[in-house]
Amino acid sequence: MEGCPGSRMMDLRKEQGAAAPVATGSLESQLAQWPIQLHLINPQAPYYQNADVLLAADCVAFALGNFHSAHLKGKSIAIACPKLDEGQEIYVDKIKAWIDDAKINTLTVMIMQVPCCGGLLALAQEAAQKATRKVPIKCVVVGLRGDILEESWV
Amino acid sequence: MRPYSPFAVFLTQVKSNGGWCSDSERVSNQTHKADLTGLLNRNIKEVMAAHPAVGEVLQAAQIGCATCAAGNCLFKDIVEIHALSPEQETTLLRRVAETVYPGQPVDLPGLQRKTLTRTGAHKFAPPLQELVDEHKVIKRVLALIPQFTCALGSPLNTQEQQMLYAIVDFVRNFADRFHHAKEEDLLFKYFDPGAAILVAMHEEHELGRAHIRSALDGIERGDTTCVRKHLTAYRELLTEHIRKEDDILYPWMERQLTDAQIGRLFAQFREVDAKFGDRPAGYRTWVGTLETKYNNTARKET
């Protein structure tokens, strides 16, 4: 296989058909804020103050079957795409503002396994280096089939 | 989130099956039914006293209960806390059953675990990693103790007494006040103080402090034998104690702590750092100086 792993076409339908039955019924959303896109959020919004913040790549919530219950619950969120979004220096400033001004408790960066997604973690680490305060940062790598490939403190 | 452990499932299955035997075996062994559930609910010291070979079985699984100073953990908690792989857990329990109930057939239930929780090199969550890094500084001093207690004259001279006072000062202020301000006063508070593993760790901390008090008494009296005895005992105790914390206690604690608790702990540790200022860094420098001095001495001697 050649080409960018981030945009390479993959048909996962057969594997999904063989998987366990999908849960039905209405599941409660764990989203507790709006907006969520990193360009749109105010890093000093009340729900970021002293919060455990989740910075997720755009694709993550679509890949994970239990995103709300297992990863979003109890956290404040922002989403971004390190491959396609412009103005990423603003992202660095906003993450830095989370750490220094909103005094967040922890930052969890959730990315897909594709190489370009590593850029989101790099943005978070750059911001953390520029920040005066230090906070624990965790990186969670999500597989294309919705599995957690790696979970580590960085 | 706490990982799935088959152990509770296993215990339930053992209870519902009425023991370790299969249906046919249970009928033929009515009067000698193996009751491993009861054994697993006893503290490990009692189990090893009644069945000394169990200590060897645990040792073979790299579980060092035989050398533990306290030994008051429940057997079932020991199995859970070591986060063995399903294969290791099955092997361990089978060997224990064979040791305690020799000759009786054992029918282990099939165990399923989603992930292997003991995985070689591991980077801890930041606050726990800090404690592990502080252990490394303490271990550097422990490593010098044999060399330096062997070189002591009898009775102690003033220069030797000064060096010994400096070591006691490091132990009391870096290892005890600074490190334990984070570990005992903060980290441990996130857990049930009655948990057997924490009681055991507290007891070892107290035993270590008692050795240092006795060593200090020896220094003041110029008693080389007393100093050697208690510093050597302290080194042995703390070396094993740190190994238990790094390899068993902290990984277990990390699995229990939520991200929010990790963040709070990290912030609390920053307050401890602010309170102690640059003194911990000063001790780290002192350890380097001590190593240089004794390594140079060792080189001259060889």
Image (cartoon, coloured by chain):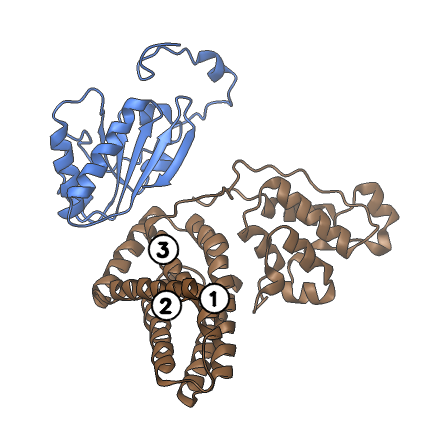
Say which of B294 and A83 sits in front.
Answer: B294
Write down which chain is painted blue: A
- From the image, state the color of chain B: brown
Give the image location of residue B191, x and y in percent: 43, 60
Give the amino acid type for the residue marked by disc 1 in the picture. Answer: Leu
- Tell me how many marks there are: 3
Secondary structure of the residue carrying tag 3 is: helix
Chain of the residue that carries numbered disc 1 in the rendered image: B
Q: Name the residue under label 2.
A: B175
Give the image location of residue A65, x and y in percent: 40, 27
Q: Mark 1 points at which residue?
A: B238
The reply to whether the C-beta atoms of the residues labelled 2 and 1 are less than 8 Å apart is yes
Residue at the far bottom: name it: B221
Q: Is residue B156 above or below residue B269?
A: below
Give the amino acid type for the residue marked by disc 3 in the picture. Answer: Asp
Q: Give the quarter of the image for residue A152.
A: top left
Question: Residue at left 68%, top 63%?
Answer: B47
Question: Residue at left 30%, top 62%?
Answer: B284
| Relative horizontal placement of residue B257, taking residue A80 as reference (left or right) | right
Give the image location of residue B121, x and y in percent: 45, 43
Chain of the residue that carries numbered disc 2 in the rendered image: B
Secondary structure of the residue carrying tag 1 is: helix
Mark number displayed over residue B210: none
Q: Name the residue under label 3.
A: B133
Cα distance in 3D space between marks 3 and 1? 15 Å
